Amino acid sequence: MARNAEKAMTALARFRQAQLEEGKVKERRPFLASECSELPKAEKWRRQIISEISKKVAQIQNAGLGEFKIRDLNDEINKLLREKGHWEVRIKELGGPDYVRFGPRMLDHEGKEVPGNRGYKYFGAARDLPGVRELFEKEPAPAPRKTRAELMKEVDAEYYGYRDEDDGVLVPLETQYEKQAVVDAVQKWRTERESRLCGDKHQEDEDEENIYSVHTEEADDEEMGEGLEEEEGGVTFISHVPVPSQKEVEEALVRRKKMELLQRYASETLQAQSQEARTLLGL
């Protein structure tokens, strides 16, 4: 027995349908919603748009249509959605219900709200297209920040380093490095001491040299030296009186310093006694 769908597709059925519609003029939906001024017709066109959207949403669930066909269907669905919004605004202007505010949300076949970006929505297999899948991947939630009380629970003796020596590894290493540091410090001290002693000895040898000594040379050498100095503009000083040595000069300076201190801080009686004692001792 033939099915109803097969009966409707027969030539006789199509001819009969054409005869019934022969005298009727099929009304087309206005291009702009503002051209409609009757509320029942606006409701009718809105329902027609919803029917078209349902058909296309059912078609786009098939992932075997190909990428280009799926993208075209998704664009047509979004275009119909915008047109439906225009008719809902027009219905509200004509005194009808506010579908924008109280109407149901657009859901997919799983009952979830259709995701989109800035008004453009993706349906069915369009959500698995290249470049679209990344739009719906959610970023991992950041780790919750611990409070001060939770952080203080983890603070113990080990946090301050009091248990670093319990593992038995740190102490031998520290002992080894400590011995090496001591050896290096002793070697450095000995090197510095030897260099300092050599420098002091060399300085003493330089200090002991008589800075007041005058070297005499033979007559020929003196005449030659005088000739050279006259050419260079130099002058030679020859001492004809005994010159004190450096040690005698230092002793004289020390005695002078002592006399200045006595005159500044000692009384007259003490100075007189000191002078008498110096006279008796023959100083």
Image (cartoon, rainbow, N blue to C red):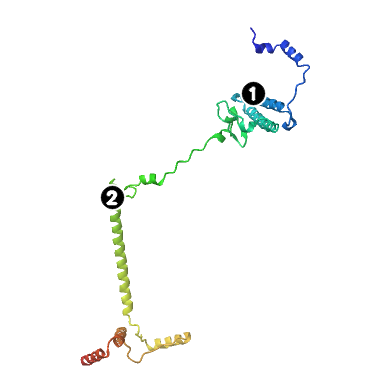
Image location (x, y in percent) of residue 23: 78, 17
* Amino acid at dot 2: Val
- Dot 2: what SS? helix
Image location (x, y in percent) of residue 254: 30, 84
Label 1 neighbour load within 10 Å: few <14, some 14-19, many 20+: few
Task: Note whether 92 is above or below 166 in the view shown.
Answer: above
Residue 131 quadrant = top right
Q: Nearer the viewer, residue 62 or 22?
A: 22
Residue at 30% across / 53% down in the picture? 177
Residue at 30% across / 60% down in the picture? 185
- In which quadrant will I find the N terminus? top right
- In which quadrant will I find the C terminus? bottom left
Nearest-to-viewer mark from 1 and 2: 1
User: Which residue was labeled with disc 1?
Assistant: 55
Residue 120 quadrant = top right
User: Which residue was labeled with disc 2?
Assistant: 171
As drawn, is 32 to the left or to the right of 176? Answer: right
Sooner in the amino-acid sequence: mark 1 or mark 2? 1
As drawn, is 40 to the left or to the right of 122? Answer: right
Q: Is residue 248 visible?
A: no
How far separated are the C-alphas under marks 1 and 2? Answer: 80 Å
